[in-house]
Image (cartoon, grey):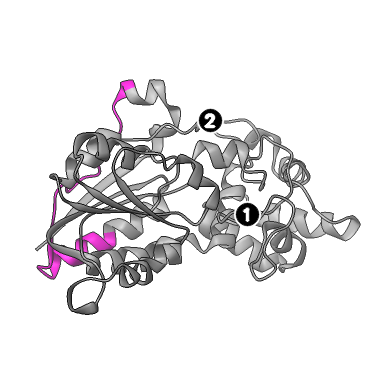
Amino acid sequence: MSLHRTVLLNETIDGLDLKSGSVVLDGTFGGGGHSREICKRYPGVKIIALDQDSSTLKNKDSNCEIIFHNENFRNLDRVLSAQGGPASGGEKVDGIIFDLGLSSDQLQNSGRGFSFLIDESLIMQMKNSGKENPSGEDITAQEIVNTWGEESLADIIYGYGEEKQARRIAKAIVESRKKQEIKTTFDLVKIIEQAIPAKFRKGRIHCATKTFQAIRIAVNDELGALAEGLQKGFEALRAGGRMSVISFHSLEDRIVKKFFRKQAEDKKAFLINKKPIIASGEEVKNNPRARSAKLRILEKI
């Protein structure tokens, strides 16, 4: 059973302005919360669901048509082309959802080292390639912390994690791995805790949060995938179609905001909400993960 609680569920679906018979691309299927709610509201809808984590297949039970593809949303053009459609350019869609970031299931049950609260192997690949046997063709978090240079480590921890202690942490990682290989999440957490001044170890968020975020983003090229997915998704929308994007940190939101604004300036779309929609106090109380969520919605002209 999925532990994940979908954030901004009603706001995301209401913003798509769907009807029975609509075609929706759920680019980050995850626990299936958005797709199942859409099926409940619009029984005649068709959903094309993407997720690079094959373990989400277990969540795809539903009472409407869901066509599942084990694929990163940056390759949605390939998926839609395979579906067929107008002028053989691929199927066009009426709505797109991108719910970015990690699900609660991935944090707690993946076995891939996403959480600094669970001692696991440092893999951090979003796609499910096996808990102890990651794909040989893709980089892992363990490879990053054990082989990348100090300057490169500092750059990603600061650039992707916005961590002010990035240089201290990078130096500590390099010094630590000289003594023994960094293999697990707890190995890395210990290094981070020892690297930063005591006054920064306690705060609203855990001191390892930003470093783990940065390494995960680097492993999966999340920001590159987002930029690519937004562009391909916009091209796949029919005129009048809408795109709902939920982001969870400033780097993601900045990319979405910039992309949406560019389409509006070029008169190709208009913004449904000029300021991001955030979760209500009640939702945050019931689901703390919603605290950092920002929803932006765009309609193609």
Q: Position of residue 95 (x, y in %)?
A: 22, 53
Q: Residue at x 52, y 60 (%)?
A: 159
Question: Callout 1 environment at 10 Å: few (<14), some (14 to 19), or many (20+)?
Answer: many
Q: Is residue 220 magenta?
A: no
215 to the left or right of 77: right
Q: CA distance from mark 2 to mark 1?
A: 18 Å
Q: Position of residue 233 (x, y in %)?
A: 28, 64
Give the magenta-colored segment's residue range.
Answer: 258-282
Q: Tag on residue 37?
A: none
- Label 1's element? helix
Amino acid on which disc 2 is placed:
Arg
The residue identified by callout 2 is 204
Q: Quadrant of the C terminus?
A: bottom left
Q: Is residue 276 above or below residue 230?
A: above
Question: Callout 2 environment at 10 Å: few (<14), some (14 to 19), or many (20+)?
Answer: few
Instruction: Decide if residue 277 is in sight here.
Output: no
41 to the left or right of 247: left
Q: Tag on residue 166?
A: 1
Residue farthest along the right direction in this orientation: 179
Q: Earlier in the sequence, mark 2 or mark 1?
A: 1
Given residues 55 and 246, the one toward you in this image is: 55
Amino acid on which disc 1 is placed:
Ala
Q: Residue at x 13, y 70 (%)?
A: 266
Given residues 66 and 123, the one toward you in this image is: 66
